[in-house]
Image: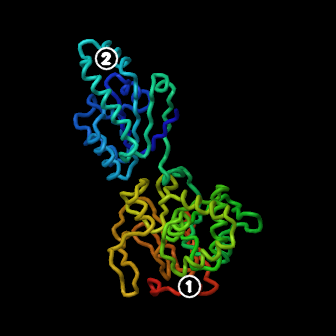
Amino acid sequence: MKIEVPELSVVVLVGVQGAGKSVFAQRWFQPEEIVSKDTCAEFRQCVAQRLQQGLLAVVDDTNLYPQTRKQYVDMARSHHAAAVAIVLATPVELCLQRNADRGTSAPREDAVRFQAEMLAKTLRTLGSEGFQQVYVLNSPDEVEFAEVMRVPLPPTRFRSDRGPFDIIGDVHGCYEELMELLQLLGWRTEGALPMHPEGRKLVFLGDFGDRGPNSVGVFRLAMQMVEAGTAYAVIGNHDYKLLRYLQGEGVHIPLGLRRTLDELEHQPPAFHDALREFIQGLPSHLVLDEGRLVVAHAGIKQSYIGRESPAVREFCIYGETTGERDEYGLPVRLNWAERYQGEAFIVYGHTPYAEPMWQNNTVNIDTGCVFGGRLTALRYPERELVSVPAREVYYLSKRPLAGE
């Protein structure tokens, strides 16, 4: 069995005494990653410290009580990390034999049999306790041939890619402006897919569609380029709303989304399926260039970088708001970038400005193309801005662009 363990996670080993948990842990994890009675008197404190530092924690204990496991699931959630359970359901008679071989330190037989009863109850509930993954090894052979694989969280899959990158702000269906911008950036657009002679990659900041004249064209181009490995992309709030619609959820349909849906009516079901799958696979944010560059649709807090949870995803999609509405009926946004003090350079969009907004090692490059502004790209690592003007006003903004 292949066991996938996210690089930032709590791995909770479950099993009776003598099941082989410690041997399994020592085989697949580094000594400093293992939290046990032998290495740490305060389990929870040690696990919390490792998660705070962005490190894996492996809890080597019986973990047979649901309230104990809940502590670790809650801890993973509060640190925006994953929780994985690995159960060693070794037959109780074998566990007893192994314990007997320990001599005077062996647990009592009745205690081990009681643990086996607890394990049977655990197996019935473990799948509903909040673990992202549950793996059950039912025999010594399964334990022997199991293979633990470290996997990155979605935001860090391409951390080692150093670029160079051309990062594109909110396109919103402005396909012609996108192609013009690519040409200005040096991309060759005459072939089936745009290619850059210097091997640069595009990075889309989300909000591919809605409001503009050719949302399907923008989506199709992004999907093809991501599949070809010449582009990366993160999810925006408009993309997320479209996904919910494609999944059959009831959503309010404003005029901007209606334009996208009208375009989709002329596309075959296979395209709808591919589009839904594409948006489902978009990460909340991406960490690139070994952590020096982070991209997110609406920005990201320093403490969220490289982590994944519903809270992280919501912030990256919508930004930070007060919960109130302004005189235009739009959410009142907090300026998270004003408080940002991190070393990573963050590029984002979401809130349109008349000109790119630089602040504290961040830049917002949404310059409101669909509202008659400009479509802007940032060249990285050069930090050079390149933009093209909108060909027309495709959609009237409810409020003036910031900075106008």
Q: Say above or below: 356 vs 119.
A: below
Q: Say above or below: 123 vs 250.
A: above
**Other residues around mark 2 within 10 Å, as few (<14) / some (14–19) / many (≥20):** many
Q: At 65% from the left edge and 75% from the top edge, which residue is drawn?
A: 263
Q: Which residue is mark 2?
A: 99
Q: Which mark is residue 395?
A: 1
Q: Position of residue 399 (x, y in %)?
A: 45, 86
Q: Say above or below: 154 vs 141.
A: below
Q: Position of residue 360 (x, y in %)?
A: 39, 68
Residue type at the position of mark 1:
Tyr
Element type at mark 2: helix
Element type at mark 1: loop
Q: Position of residue 369 (x, y in %)?
A: 57, 80
Residue type at the position of mark 2:
Asn
Q: At 77% from the left edge and 65% from the top edge, which residue is drawn?
A: 191
Rendered image quadrant of residue 91: top left
Q: At 47% from the left edge and 60% from the top edge, which residue is drawn?
A: 284
Q: Position of residue 99 (x, y in %)?
A: 31, 17
Viewer-closest of 72 and 128: 128
The answer, for residue 61, to whether it is visible in the render is no
Q: At 55% from the left edge and 84% from the top edge, which residue is drawn?
A: 371
